Image (cartoon, rainbow, N blue to C red):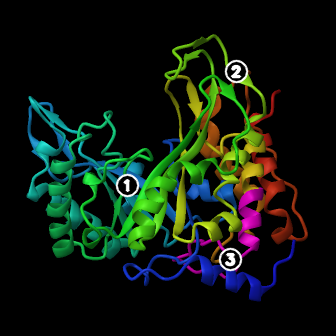
Amino acid sequence: MHISSAVSAAIVAALFPLSALGQARLPTKFILGAWLDVADTSTTFNAKMGRNLPSYQAAVSIPYNITSDGIILNDPRPGEDATYLSNPQGWTDGTDASVFMTVYADQVLGAAEGMALVTDESIRSLAVRLAKITTDTGRAVLMRWLPEMNGAWMRYGQRPAEYVALWIRMHRIFRANAPNVVLVWAPNYDLRDESYWPGPEYVDWIGCSCYWKGWGVNSLIDQSYAMDTVSGVYNTYAVRYNLPFVIAEASGAWESGPGVSPITGASFASVTNQVDQATFQRSFWAGLLSPSVMLQYPLLRGAYIFEVAKMEEFYSDFRVGNDLQTLLTFRSLVDAADAAGVMAWANRTTPRATTSASRNTTTTATSIATTVTTSLATTAAEVSSAVEVATTAATKTSDAKKTAGAFLLSVSYLFLFCIV
């Protein structure tokens, strides 16, 4: 469906008013970000998506580390910050995508753990490092500080008075040392206790996590599910205080293998699939990547794909980019939202005459095939049948802008999953 530029402009104006903090750096449209598994980087994931995502998530502990002999490190030693997921200075995607840094107080030293180990000096060291990301790379930084604090699974969880006192200390130190970092307060979706709230003067954005788990059944997800799940936090804090809202972790868990439901205690030898994985993920994400949803929730500023597969109660694959059909289906949702003019994309920081600032539409078939195949090679062990990576170059086309989307990604995946 064609949407006129005037209608698109009206939708954007209604959905995304500028926020006072970070408006010079952060986009004002919907931010679709990703928290990647170790098999991906921002470069390879951008190639899968055919676009430059406007934000990527990373994670770090506070204090940074505790050595085996009990030495507390507030900063990494030289060479210790080389891991991709925790080192945005090492990102090589060549864009201005922002950094969404999640910080966990998850360290243990003897009888002390969590918030007890967070000192003013460790906060100051973190603030200086995050400010340096912007200085060194030009990327804006959002920080999700000690999220899901109402959950018993966190070492700092279910201690509201201590949490609020630490938040206020953190705010004071960050405003002095990293004033441009956007501070994101992000409880688990089921928060009922307002005593975790530090006050609107200490918070820039509101965040929340949102997952679907079928506990042994992969089924269609109602389109209202995602926002219904987070609406309590959205209405109580984002709407009440007129603050931007972001879903910091999101996806449906496509389950497989044996497992046990934590709700009923029932054991499953295998999972029942009522739909395929592509339809399953589409049903989850349709509840977020929709202009009508964004109009209904005007403070919703973005969502981060939890692009990870891991063992939980069942083996849970949250990814949208590991399976060809799932990726193409997900991209069709993104295409529709983008056509409405509501999606933000990163700009290239190294201008190229043949590359769009928002979409990688002129990338050649061979380069996409090589990039995506390389990024997915480490996941081949998950496929039960033998797989070989083909090396045949992609056929040249006369119009790269029209063919560098679904066709090129199909070629890439066929290279990876071609069974000889």
- Mark count: 3
| Location of residue 157 by image quarter | top left
Disc 1 target residue:
186
**Tag 3: residue type?**
Ser
Rendered residue at 53%/18% (across/down): 264
Of tags 1 and 3, the one toward the viewer is 1
Disc 2 target residue:
384
SS state under label 1: loop
Residue 152 x, y percent position in the rendering: 31, 34
Q: CA distance from mark 2 to mark 3?
A: 38 Å
| Location of residue 346 by image quarter | bottom right
Label 3: few (<14), some (14–19) or many (≥20) C-alpha neighbours in 10 Å: some
What segment is highlighted magenta in the picture? 332-354
Q: Earlier in the sequence, mark 2 or mark 3?
A: 3
SS state under label 3: loop
Rendered residue at 21%/52% (across/down): 78
| Location of residue 8 by image quarter | bottom right
**Tag 1: residue type?**
Ala
Q: Quadrant of the C terminus?
A: top right
Q: Earlier in the sequence, mark 1 or mark 3?
A: 1
Of tags 1 and 2, the one toward the viewer is 1
Q: CA distance from mark 1 to mark 2?
A: 38 Å
Label 1: few (<14), some (14–19) or many (≥20) C-alpha neighbours in 10 Å: many
Rendered residue at 66%/63% (across/down): 293
Residues 13 and 33: in front is 13
Q: Quadrant of the N terminus?
A: bottom right
SS state under label 2: loop
Residues 391 and 215: in front is 215
Q: CA distance from mark 1 to mark 3?
A: 34 Å
Residue 171 x, y percent position in the rendering: 20, 66
